[in-house]
Image (cartoon, rainbow, N blue to C red):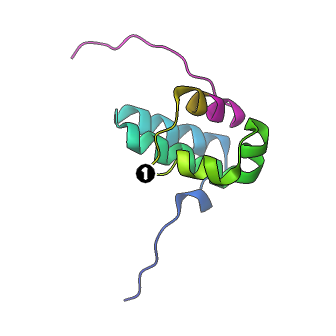
Amino acid sequence: MKTTKWDPAEDINTKEEVYAYLEAALEENDTELLLAVIGDIARSKGMAAIAKELNVARESLYRSLSAAGNPSFATVANTLNALGYQLTLKQKIPA
């Protein structure tokens, strides 16, 4: 049996899929996962176009959103904004 690496960026097509993917990543409370998901979504929408809108080099944005990246809060917020999302605050319900 031959397997191939799955690339989520190839399967994120609708606004609903993007939203569900982001929401699932946020629920995990894992910063590295969230950055990877934002990177997947940016790649699905066209990293070059997102980078241009943010006025940064495409390679720099790739690096920032990679597993080894350490983007600033502004980079994360601006990338989400370029993707059509904004950060909001919601009080956590105690367990």
Image position, residue 4 (x, y; %): 46, 78
Question: Is 70 one of the magenta-colored residues?
Answer: no
Say which residue label 1 marks: 67
Is residue 77 found left or right of 67 in the rendered image? right
Q: Nearer the viewer, residue 7 or 63?
A: 63
Q: Residue at x 62, y 33 (%)?
A: 80
In the rendered view, tell whether residue 33 sits above or below residue 10.
above
Residue sitting at x 39%, y 37%:
31
Quadrant (top left/top right/bottom left/bottom right) for the C terminus: top left
Highlighted magenta segment, given as a residue range: 78-95
Horizontal side of 75 relative to 6 (left or right) equals right
Whether residue 46 can be seen here: no
92 vs 77, left or right, is left
Identify residue type, mark 1. Ala
Residue that appears at 48% across and 42% down: 35
Q: Name the quadrant of the N terminus.
A: bottom left
Q: Quadrant of residue 10?
A: bottom right
Tell me: residue 89, above or below residue 40.
above
On screen, residue 81 above or below 94:
below
Dot 1, how many residues are within 10 Å of its Cα: few (below 14), some (14-19), or many (20+)?
some
